[in-house]
Amino acid sequence: MHDHRAWGHFKRSVPQPLASRWLVAQAPEIDLRNPVESRGRFNEFQRTMLQWSSLHPYTAVHVLKVAAPITPDRFAEGLNKVLSESGLGSLSIDRKLGTYHFHRGPQACVPRQVESGRDPMAALSAEIERQLNEPFAFEDRFVPFRFFILPGTAETHVGISYFHAIADAESIGRLLLEIVRSCLAPDPAPVPDQILRPHGGLMVPLGNPIHAFTRSWAALRKFQKMRNSYRPPSCEVNDFRNEFISLTFAQPETAQALTKARGWNVTLNDLCLAALLLAVAPLATNRFRTSRSHLSVGCVVNLRHDLKPGKRDDFGLSLGSFSITHPVPKDISLRELACDIRSETLQVKKQKLYLAAPLEFRVSRFMFGRMPVEKQRNFYRKSYPVWGSITNRKVDELCRSAGIVEVVDYFRAVSAGPAMPFVISVTGIDGRLNFGISYKPGVISADKMAGVIQRFSALLKEPGGAS
């Protein structure tokens, strides 16, 4: 788990000064006598998420496992303290203008208590699924977070469900860790000023006009290439709900996957994308009889390392994406496919083609917003035929920077939304991989999705020498 080259996209840019900002004794305090309300403008990805949320809740969930007892009352006290001091508790949105407004003031959120029963992980999975499908009433002023807790005598699971358009995994991880810190400290200090304060929105850097044109042209060529992609199954009814499945690789299984990636000179992200393509291929056996014989999958990218240093720690959302389109012939091996993908992702990184995503979002949002629901539910299937997507994050560095040794595990999930049939959230912590799979049963049935997950997992677990 210490092979940074194999992790690839999992290695995120957390600036070195962040560690010192987690030290409360050195951090400036928020002056509650002179509260400052935060306003900002949504970037293109956020505005697209807002549009998706009008069709189905576009929500994400994070869960921390803490090796310490936390009572529901203590959790409520800690989370309301952090929300109040950081000014994140209450939000209003102007969809027409694409702006948001965080209103400062005391908060009184009540976390939902989850009963563990005989199987705590099954209870957590059921709660994650419930949270993914519960909407936020974002047309009026609202709290963009919901909290839940599964208490125990020696360990506690605490979770946050959030309106995804307002924050990315980086920001939510800091928020949840700060809440846990507040719950564990006998006399918690004020929230450090720079960790959780929104600062007017995170705009994706477009670069100079030549770079912008190059990326836009690359986006156009990608769309042309995706015209050869076999489309996922259609959504026949207006049922956009998500179901959720969790999967964990223990340290030996994770180490084997990393060793294989290193031995093939690819990143773990490349390996996951290759395994995903091979896992969905049996669902598209008819593609070789059509002109659309290729398959496409997507990947979400953290853009904070592309922001100016002074903006990288801001609370908000800074994400991009790219897709991989490949013919995936019947006899191709995992190694061959991963190496093909590696050559493509190297070009994506070199030319920063993931920064072209805002243009794609703007165009698709314009078209999507002018369609009835019956056409919206299959719009992305036709224009962006991606079967599934990977969103990955390695959280060890963030947890170390927070200095909370009691955090021993981390789980994530994100709604599949209207854009694709399923999303796999991959979270690396302490030499393990946790997979949170959300999918739309109205597009891919439960038994077929179980087959995809089984094949995906088996491919990653194969010995490095296997083809």
Image: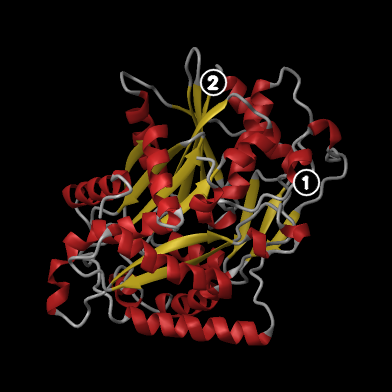
Residue closer to the observer: 184 or 296: 296
Total marks placed: 2
- Residue at x 19%, y 49% (from the top left corner): 451
Q: Position of residue 113 (x, y in %)?
A: 46, 25
Q: Secondary structure at mark 2?
A: loop
Q: Is residue 242 visible?
A: no
Residue 421 on image: x %, y %: 30, 59
Q: Is residue 14 visible?
A: yes
Classify residue 382 by image quadrant: bottom left
Task: Please state the horizontal and vertical placement of residue 185, each as a whole percent of the image.
Answer: 70, 21
Q: In the image, what residue occupies the spot 42% across and 49% down?
A: 425
Which residue does the numbered mark 2 point to in the structure image?
Answer: 67
Q: Is residue 15 above or below residue 397?
A: below
Disc 2 crowd rating (10 Å Cα; few below 14, some 14-19, many 20+) is some
Instruction: Give 185 or 349, whichever is nearer the viewer.
Output: 349
Residue in the picture at 46% in, 51% down: 59
Q: Residue at x 64, y 47 (%)?
A: 90
**Relative side of 136 to 108, left or right:** left
Q: Position of residue 7 (x, y in %)?
A: 50, 50
Which is in the foreground here, disc 1 or disc 2? 1
Amino acid, disc 1: Pro
Residue 17 numbered mark, or none: 1
Q: Residue furthest top?
A: 153
**Does 380 sit left or right of 407 as displayed?**
left
Q: Amino acid at mark 2?
A: Ala
Picture quadrant where residue 208 is located:
bottom right
Relative to 209, residue 1 above or below: above
Tag 1: Cα neighbours inside 10 Å, few (<14), some, or many (≥20)? few
Judge whether 167 appears above or below 175 on screen: below
Query: Gap between marks 1 and 2, in whole Å?
Result: 27 Å
